[in-house]
Image: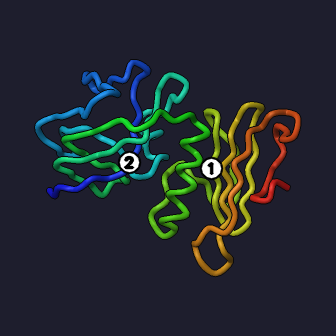
Amino acid sequence: MERKRVRAFKGFRKDLTCLGFQFREDKINRTEEANCVKNGFHCAENPLDCFHYYSDWRNSVYYEVDAGGDLDEDAVDSKISCTEMRLIRRLSLEQMLFEAAVYMVEHPKRQWNYGVKKETGTACNGYGVVRGKNPRAAGEKGDFLLILKEEQNSPEIEEIALINIDGKRWHPHKFYDAYGK
């Protein structure tokens, strides 16, 4: 365990509870121990990992957090356990997807989240994330599509589209690429 501060993301129930703990926005929340497997406040560096733990985004809330105190990480995903957590700002689904794009741009070689589809995918549960050399995504009205185009000879991201299928400019059941075409 080491002492440092990490920018991360966390999901909660709508009342800001998680595993029986009532979090507060106006203070640093503290607990005694941090172990990813059994205790501490859990959060993730990759915003998409929050959807693994709080997948029903319509009945959950998500925050950018400042994780500190004692930190523990595991090799499962980007999950972190910490003894101190400050809630920075509440994020919408669209903002979470934007932050996920930022994470993938900053860490193009890290393992992909299980929800990221390679080259082609359709939205599920209100959103879809597709990444690749020629990625394409489709969805229903109201869905968000995050499309990340990689450089041809590397995993670096060269183009990003975040599209809301509104039925006017962006149409349901139509596949779009990272250029919105």
- The disc, 1 or 2, on the residue closer to the chain's N-terminal end is 2
Residue under the point 54% across and 42% down? 96
Identify the residue position indicated by label 1 in the image. Answer: 129
Q: How many marks?
A: 2
Q: Position of residue 24 (x, y in %)?
A: 31, 25
Q: Position of residue 51 (x, y in %)?
A: 47, 39
Q: Quick check: 48 above or below 39?
A: below
Q: Is residue 115 left or right of residue 17?
A: right
Name the kind of residue labelled 2 in the image.
Ala
Q: Quadrant of the N terminus?
A: bottom left
Q: Position of residue 34 (x, y in %)?
A: 17, 44
Q: Quick check: 110 above or below 40?
A: below
Residue under the point 74% across and 66% down? 134
Q: Is residue 42 left or right of residue 1?
A: right
Q: Quadrant of the C terminus?
A: bottom right
**Extreme residue toward the right, this view:** 168
Q: CA distance from mark 1 to mark 2?
A: 19 Å
User: Label 2 crowding class (10 Å Cα cut-off): few <14, some 14-19, many 20+?
Assistant: many
Identify the residue position indicated by label 2 in the image. Answer: 8
Local SS, label 2:
strand
Name the kind of residue labelled 1 in the image.
Val
Residue under the point 46% across and 28% down? 61
**Residue 73 falls in which quadrant of the image?**
bottom left
**Extreme residue toward the bottom, this view:** 153
Q: Quick check: 176 above or below 106?
A: above
**Residue 178 falls in which quadrant of the image?**
bottom right
Q: Position of residue 139 (x, y in %)?
A: 74, 40
Residue under the point 18% across and 38% down? 39
